[in-house]
Image: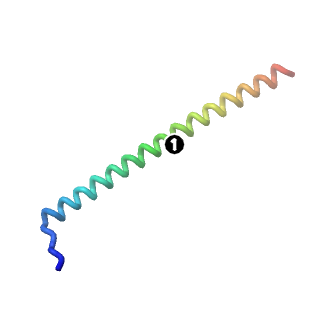
């Protein structure tokens, strides 16, 4: 027969579950921040390359 969990055991399990959820959310935010930063770097690089290509086009004409 299964033993009923005490209130203390249930509170501890809930605490661990909550901590895991918050940690998971924090990690998700870090991943999102990293992806956004990478996207910004790529955008800046594309703008730089486009500007360079435009200036070369005008210099060659």
Residue extending furthest toward the bottom: 1
Q: Name the side, left or right, on which 60 lies relative to 13.
A: right
Residue extending furthest toward the right: 61
Report the coloring of the rendering.
rainbow
Residue extending furthest toward the top: 59
Query: What residue is drawn where x is 48% and y is 40%?
Result: 34
* Image x and y of residue 49, in percent: 69, 29
Vertical comparison of 27 with 60: above or below: below
How many numbered dots are placed on residues in this image?
Answer: 1
Q: Nearer the viewer, residue 20 or 57?
A: 20
Q: Name the side, left or right, on which 24 lies relative to 1.
A: right
| Classed neighbour count for the residue bearing mark 1: other residues with Cα under 10 Å, few (<14), some (14–19), many (≥20) | few
Vertical comparison of 55 with 47: above or below: above
Q: Name the side, left or right, on which 49 lies relative to 16.
A: right
Quarter of the rendering occupied by the N terminus: bottom left
Vertical comparison of 21 with 53: above or below: below
Query: What residue is drawn where x is 16% and y is 63%?
Result: 9
Q: Which residue is mark 1?
A: 35
Q: Nearer the viewer, residue 54 or 28?
A: 28
Query: What residue is drawn where x is 60% and y is 36%?
Result: 42
Quarter of the rendering occupied by the C terminus: top right
* Image x and y of residue 6, in percent: 12, 68
When asked about the image quadrant of residue 48, the answer is top right
Local secondary structure at mark 1: helix
When asked about the image quadrant of residue 43, the answer is top right
Q: Nearer the viewer, residue 43 or 28?
A: 28
Query: What residue is drawn where x is 27% and y is 56%?
Result: 18
């Amino acid at each position: 027969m299964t033993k009923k969990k005490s209130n203390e055991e249930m509170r501890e399990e809930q605490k661990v579950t909550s901590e895991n959820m918050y940690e998971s959310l924090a990690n998700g935010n870090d991943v999102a921040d990293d992806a956004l930063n990478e996207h910004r770097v790529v955008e800046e690089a594309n703008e730089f390359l486009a500007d360079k290509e435009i200036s070369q086009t005008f210099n060659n004409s």
